[in-house]
Amino acid sequence: MCKGAHSHEGELPLITPSGEARYLYMKVSIPEPYRQNLKKVLVSYIDITRQKLYEKSLEENQQELSQY
């Protein structure tokens, strides 16, 4: 992890093999007993594609409304 941190999280945009855009929320953490040897690392992903599409739609609607 960066600068001694024991966890990291963030959003990852990706393109599937079929060409579909998807967005994932990822979290990586190292449990306390394994921080020195990194024998165990926990990784979790959540598909946030629907949320991102709603956010984009909302932003577009707000821009459209601001023109009036």
Image (cartoon, rainbow, N blue to C red):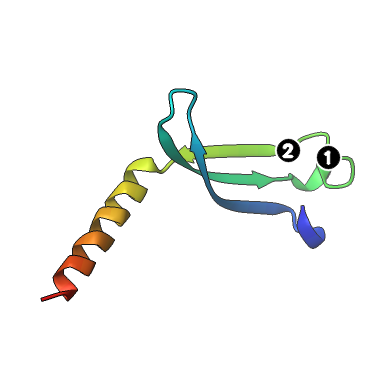
- Secondary structure under tag 2 reads loop
Query: Quadrant location of residue 31?
Result: top right
Q: Which residue is disc 2 drawn over?
A: 41
Badge 2 amino acid: Val
Q: Is residue 9 left or right of residue 4?
A: left
- Which residue: 17% across, 66% down? 64
Q: Nearer the viewer, residue 9 or 38?
A: 9
Q: What is the x, y in percent for residue 54?
A: 27, 51
Tell me whether circle 1 and circle 2 mark residues in contact (CB < 8 Å). yes
Q: Is residue 1 left or right of residue 11?
A: right
Disc sitting over residue 30 in the figure: none
Residue placed furthest toward the top: 18
Q: Is residue 65 left or right of residue 8?
A: left
Q: Which residue is disc 1 drawn over?
A: 38
Q: Nearer the viewer, residue 29 or 67?
A: 67
Q: Quadrant of the C terminus?
A: bottom left
Q: What is the x, y in percent for residue 55?
A: 31, 56
